[in-house]
Amino acid sequence: MRGGGVAGRFGCRRVAFPITVWVSDDGSMSIPLASGEGSVRYGHDAFDPGLLAASKGLRRISVCIPARNEATTVGQIVRTIVVALTGLHGGVPLVDEVLVIDDGSMDQTAAVAAQAGARVLSADTPGGGKGQAMRSALKAAEGDLVAFVDADVTNFGAHFVSGLLGPLLTDDALCLVKGYYQRPLHGVPDGGGRVTELMAKPVIDVLFPHLASIEQPLAGETAAPREVLEKCGLADGYAVELALLIDVAARFGVSTVAQVDLGIRIHRNRPLSELRPQATNILRAALERAPLVTSD
């Protein structure tokens, strides 16, 4: 288990890290990267669920799934987690609760999730957006460690959850775990992630270059100690993932962020017309966290 300056129950260290972007005379922008900073990477197969369960001690673990109109996929996702990772059906007793937050669904999302074994609650502001649903989940969840997974994945496996939890259970210095993966689109292995490639990564390159090594800054598969999520907060809407990444790195340092290769992730790909509002939210959240200061 990695050591280091410990602050709080989970050992995340707060660091002084600038988030102001300086614009030079030639228009270039940069943020200095603290010495030794970097994001560690793992493969999901580095973590055996049984060994993780044995090492969790008294820590409780919640898996939270924000969902809106995902009746066709949420049941299988919940069922996979419940059967493989809760110990209720002969699986590994790693996860203590599976919580689905129904964000104003018009279909049978809530009923399907409940039938599959989840505790289902309505978002505090139904239809308010992903970030608001995640806040509702955090408020209701009982876990000391909280993992979030998306509800639209069609090839979901238990390794999505054990992979996210592994770094947190084996390294107390970590504050955030982000999943990364291949996202096929129309037969192209890496054709997905259009908002990531066209908005999130360019924004990071220009405004937050210290985060350029993060493969999937918008990944819905993420996990953190509860106290980290409560200290940093969860932004509104689709920008919640990028905002959390920026805030954790600014508060605790990039070295407290780990990435886990989850393999291939197949999900519903949205039409281009639905991606512009998402991209706008990403840009807004980034600019709110990187005020521009023009140098003389």
Image (cartoon, rainbow, N blue to C red):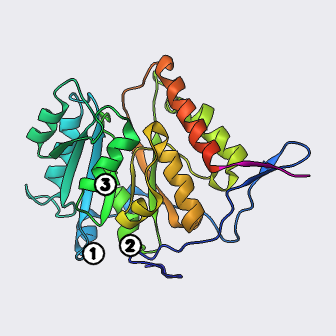
- Residue 246 part of the magenta segment: no
Q: Residue at x 20, y 29 (%)?
A: 71
**Are the residues tagged 3 and 1 within 8 Å (C-beta)?**
no
The residue that mark 2 highlights is 170
* Secondary structure type for disc 3: helix
Q: Residue at x 49, y 61 (%)?
A: 258
Which label's residue is closer to the chain start, 3 or 1?
A: 1
Q: Mark 3 near mark 2, Cβ–Cβ under 8 Å?
A: no
Q: CA distance from mark 1 to mark 2?
A: 8 Å
Q: Nearer the viewer, residue 161 or 128?
A: 128
Which badge, 1 or 2, comes first in the chain's sequence? 1
The disc labelled 1 sits on which kind of residue?
Answer: Ser
Left or right placement of residue 278 versus residue 168 in this view? right
Q: Which residue is mark 1?
A: 55
* Residue 264 x, y percent position in the rendering: 41, 40
Residue 266 visible, this angle: yes
SS class of the residue under badge 1? Answer: helix
Q: Which is more toward the observer, 109 or 133?
A: 133
Q: Residues within 10 Å of mark 2 (few under 14, many from 20)?
A: some
Q: Which residues are magenta?
A: 290-296
Measured in 3D between alpha carbons, the distance from the residue under mark 3 to the one under mark 2, in whole angstroms, is 22 Å
Residue pointed to by mark 3: 138
Q: Amino acid at mark 3?
A: Leu
Residue 149 showing in the rendered view: no
- Dot 1: few (<14), some (14–19), or many (≥20) neighbours within 10 Å? some
